[in-house]
Image: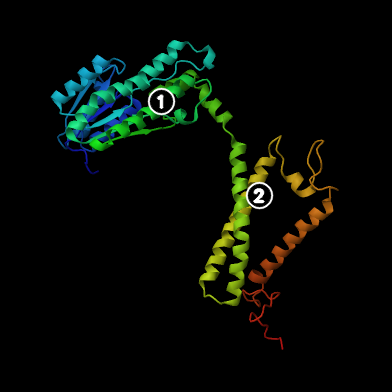
Amino acid sequence: MTQPLVGHVALVTGAGRGIGRAIAQDLASRGADLALADIDPPEETLAIIRKIQANHGAKAMTVAMDVTQETQVRAACETIRNTLGPITVCVNNAGIMQRQSADHHTLPISDLERMLAVHVTGSALVCAAVIPHMREKNFGRIVNLSSVLGLVGLQRRTAYSTAKAAIAGLTRGLALENGRYGITVNAVAPGYVLTDVLREKMRLGTLDHTLEMIKSFDWQGLVKLLLAVSMVTLLVCSMPVVASGYLTYLNWLGKWTKEVHETLGNFMLLAVGCHVGAVTLLSTGKTDRQVRPMITGCVAGNGPDLVKHNLVAVALALLLAVVSFWSWQTYQYILDPQLTQQARWLHPVGGYNDANDD
């Protein structure tokens, strides 16, 4: 692996385990001198990092840092400057999980305050301490750890979702302030990562909010979106596929019309498959059955029929006609070696002429 961070000093908070340790290992492999910060000095992580750094002579150190305490944060950053040099890379990873899954109105306000203090105030304090180092070097990279739950929210985890969402606002503001000094500020929003904390919650059976998130996901909404996209694709491609097929038949504009025709045809076949699949999936639900109204022309319940007189025979006849037409075309183009790729049932002016025609 290349080492683009040689000569840079990187600070990783929450480096004692999990995501923080993994980030530190990656930065070490890229040649950075590392400052590993956690509420207790992460000596185990330091041992891992020094093994990685053994081949390229980079340095590493640990610092005790409670990110909610401004004096500790500033003192730790000053110690890092004096030992390794100005900090030019900072990853704000320190964080905590919400202690209990509960409706917001029953959650102690102290839980929310603690969550905001660690995630938001902590990230803000560390950024405030390292930005002068970066402006001095006219270079800096800050990455704040948010969460996918900060983007979409999650019931009974409002404190955690709120704190992670606030990190996005902090990140955008700092990016605008510091871009002119060669400093970029970004946030990443990971989903669930199998860390020691997550393993412990799984062992204790306290990861109920994961199941809640899965159950609350709007699968039917996603399938309906697929249904709509497939319908739009069919409508958009229908006329161009007919036109390109006709031009291919006449051979007026060369072979490219055949390629266009085949490509559009493949899109339409894919859209048909998606449409049928989406309708089938929706029809497996208890409240949104789609197949019966499409075939019979009537809806369940007391509402009016989709077709005034419930013309089942007409609907089935149309379906049979379409299937028969496709079967006949398949026979013509694929199964009968005596026929060419041009349709014998079409005879436009200047087009195909049968050898037996006068």
Give the alpha-carbon distance from disc 1 to disc 2, as whole Å: 42 Å
Label 1 or label 2, whichever lies nearer to me, is 1
Q: Which mark is residue 140?
A: none
The answer to whether residue 87 shows anywhere in this view is: no
Crowd tier of the residue under label 2, counting other residues whose Cα lies within 10 Å: few below 14, some 14–19, many 20 or above? some
Q: Disc 2 marks which amino acid?
A: Val
**Left of 209 or right of it: where is 122?**
left
Considering every residue shown, the one lying at the far bottom of the view is 358
**Which residue lies under the disc numbered 2?**
276
Crowd tier of the residue under label 1, counting other residues whose Cα lies within 10 Å: few below 14, some 14–19, many 20 or above? some
The answer to whether residue 270 shows anywhere in this view is: yes
Depicted 286 relative to depicted 230: above or below: above
Measured as percent of width and height from the top left, residue 27 is found at: 26, 34
- Badge 2 marks a residue whose secondary structure is helix
**Left of 324 or right of it: where is 335?**
left
Q: Can you say which quadrant of the picture contains the C terminus?
A: bottom right
Measured as percent of width and height from the top left, residue 240 is found at: 59, 63
**Which residue lies under the disc numbered 1?**
166
Measured as percent of width and height from the top left, residue 341 is found at: 61, 74
User: In front: 92, or 316?
Assistant: 92
Badge count: 2
Q: Which of the two discs, 1 and 2, labels the residue nearer the N terminus?
A: 1
Considering every residue shown, the one lying at the far right of the view is 309
Q: Disc 1 marks which amino acid?
A: Ala
Q: Image point 46% across, 24% down: which residue?
A: 161
Pointer 1 with pointer 2, Cβ within 8 A: no
- Badge 1 marks a residue whose secondary structure is helix
